[in-house]
Image: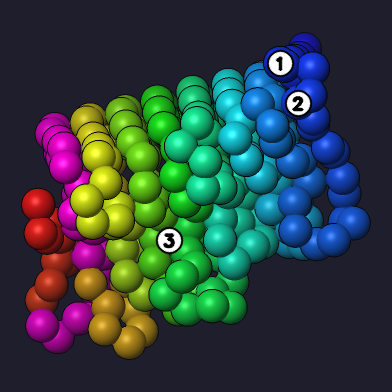
Amino acid sequence: NMQLTLRAEPPSATVLVQAQVNNEHMVWLQNGAELIVEDMTFDALDIERVFLVDDSELTLRRSTLMNGRGHQGALIRLGGSSSNTLDVEDCVFADSIATGAHGNDDGGGHIFIEHGDVTIDRTVFRNGEATNSRGGSIRIDGGQLVVSESEFVDNTARRAGAVYCRPADGSDDECRFTDNRFVENVVDGQSPNAAALFIRNADIVHVGRNVFCDNTSTDVMNRGGALRLQDL
């Protein structure tokens, strides 16, 4: 009982679906496209990311995304448009690697957000990795990230084992985390810190009723065994 809904508004919007064409992404949303995905599984076969969102809207419900690869967001990447939106409900993100080819500019073992408004509810992020980079599961560089009733388990990065939030200075950005679980996330490598959650520079921050359990950092300077907040 699977349903995939594609909506392209205005008529100039495009949705390009491709598999193993350029080893970058399977689905490309651009120019104001709207895509709703329900009850589906996307397996990127350790080759490419699933979604690239550019000036568009993506909604995921009751779906699984897994086995992605990409230096910025192994499963989903939101580009630099402030009109990007991503809504995720009751999904699973699993077993994906942001390859870290460009070091500090990379990351997001599951999702990379250059800019956009992102809302995530009741979703599991498992076994994501940002190789030699930031955000084993999610990295956001600008916009709004609101996460509730979700789980981050067994994710790994050099900085921020699960989620890395560092908007640009002077931007109007927001990071909210409520009723989530962060379990067995790890930071390791050169200058590791914030085993689960790192937030810096955001204008509005809320971290409430979250559980942090068995997260691990190898940082000898003790900069956040689970959580690090800086320059707020």
Looking at the rendered structure, the kind of residue marked 2 is Ala
Mark 3: give few (<14), some (14-19) or many (20+) Cα within 10 Å: many
Q: Quadrant of the N terminus?
A: top right
Q: Spatial distance from mark 3 to mark 1, Cα to Cα?
A: 34 Å
Looking at the rendered structure, the kind of residue marked 3 is Gly
Residue 61 within the magenta-colored segment of the rendering? no
Residue receiving disc 2: 13
Residue at left 25%, top 40%? 172
Q: Is label 2 in a helix, a strand or a loop? A: loop
> Depth-wise, is mark 2 or mark 3 nearer the camera?
2
Residue at left 79%, top 46%? 26
Residue receiving disc 1: 9
Q: Spatial distance from mark 2 to mark 1, Cα to Cα?
A: 6 Å
- Asked if the residue under mark 1 is in contact with the one under mark 2, i.e. CB atoms within 8 Å, the reply is yes
Front one among 204 and 49: 204
Q: Judge left or right: residue 119 versus residue 42.
A: left
Residue at left 39%, top 60%? 135
Q: Judge left or right: residue 143 versus residue 224.
A: right
Q: Is label 3 in a helix, a strand or a loop? A: loop
* Span of residues in magenta: 194-221
Q: Earlier in the sequence, mark 3 or mark 1?
A: 1
**Residue 118 versus residue 73 in the image, above or below:** above
Rendered location of residue 77, percent (x, y): 58, 49
Q: Is residue 200 visible?
A: yes
> Depth-wise, is mark 3 or mark 1 nearer the camera?
1
Residue at left 49%, top 68%? 106
Residue receiving disc 3: 136
Q: Count the marks.
A: 3
